[in-house]
Amino acid sequence: MAVVTPGRYSGTNFAVIDGKGRIAVPSQFRNNVPLNADGQRVLWVGFHEKLPCLVAYGQDQYDRLSDEIERDRAAALARNLDFDEDEAFKQRFSYTEAYTLDDSGRFLPNFTARDRVGETGATAFVGSGRRFEIWWLPTLAECAAADPVLQRLAANWAETKGRARK
């Protein structure tokens, strides 16, 4: 049984993109996305700052990142420095979108997100604390900046289509 810790993500898992292009978030990550007031799991998905993958997190992390911008603004004003709050939000969230996960933990990425994960194939989920990465396996297998173990796993998954070894 998986340990549920809202807003904390660890481990690595793989999932196939279904025939409709939906990504199913594995339960070890999905169960840690906090429920909103309506009892739904809202997943914020955007581009990673440095790597060619997506990052995902719950409303708690979205709120924390928004609060950081507010703190940066207050600190800049206290030092009599210019601060463009709109530009800060744009840099952090311009490619970020909220998705309500269905009962199976799936979401259909928009056009922009599909640029990073493709429309078919499989994805890797990599926990990184307050958020997790979503990789399209061909990109992960070829990314020189990615962890070498993950690269090898991605290449092996692609070769075996996720089947166990005989």
Image: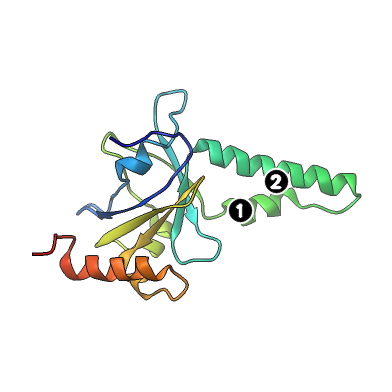
State the residue at coordinates (23%, 65%).
157
Q: In the rendered image, which quarter contains the C terminus?
A: bottom left
Is there a contact, CB below 8 Å, between mark 2 and mark 1? yes
**Nearer the observer, 68 or 27:** 27
State the residue at coordinates (28%, 50%).
22
User: In 3D space, how far apart are the residues under numbered discs 2 and 1 (Cα atoms)?
Assistant: 9 Å
* Count of numbered marks: 2
In the rendered view, tell whether residue 15 sits above or below residue 7: below
Could you tell me residue 142's position as x and y percent? Answer: 37, 75
Residue 69 numbered mark, or none: 2
State the residue at coordinates (54%, 66%).
50
Neighbourhood count class around disc 2 (C-alpha, 10 Å): few under 14, some 14–19, many 20 upward: some
Could you tell me residue 148's position as x and y percent? Answer: 39, 71
Could you tell me residue 47's position as x and y percent? Answer: 49, 58
In the rendered view, tell whether residue 59 sits above or below residue 51: above
In the rendered view, tell whether residue 100 sits above or below residue 88: above
Q: Is residue 47 left or right of residue 22?
A: right
Q: In the rendered image, which quarter contains the N terminus?
A: top left
Q: Amino acid at mark 1?
A: Arg
**Nearer the observer, 50 or 9:** 9
Residue 51 appears in the rendering: yes
Q: Amino acid at mark 2?
A: Ile
Q: How is the image coloured?
A: rainbow
**Nearer the observer, 38 or 158:** 158
Q: Residue farthest to the left?
A: 166
Looking at the rendered structure, the secondary structure element under dot 2 is helix
Residue 92 numbered mark, or none: 1
Q: Earlier in the sequence, mark 2 or mark 1?
A: 2
State the residue at coordinates (18%, 60%).
162
Could you tell me residue 38's position as x and y percent? Answer: 42, 23
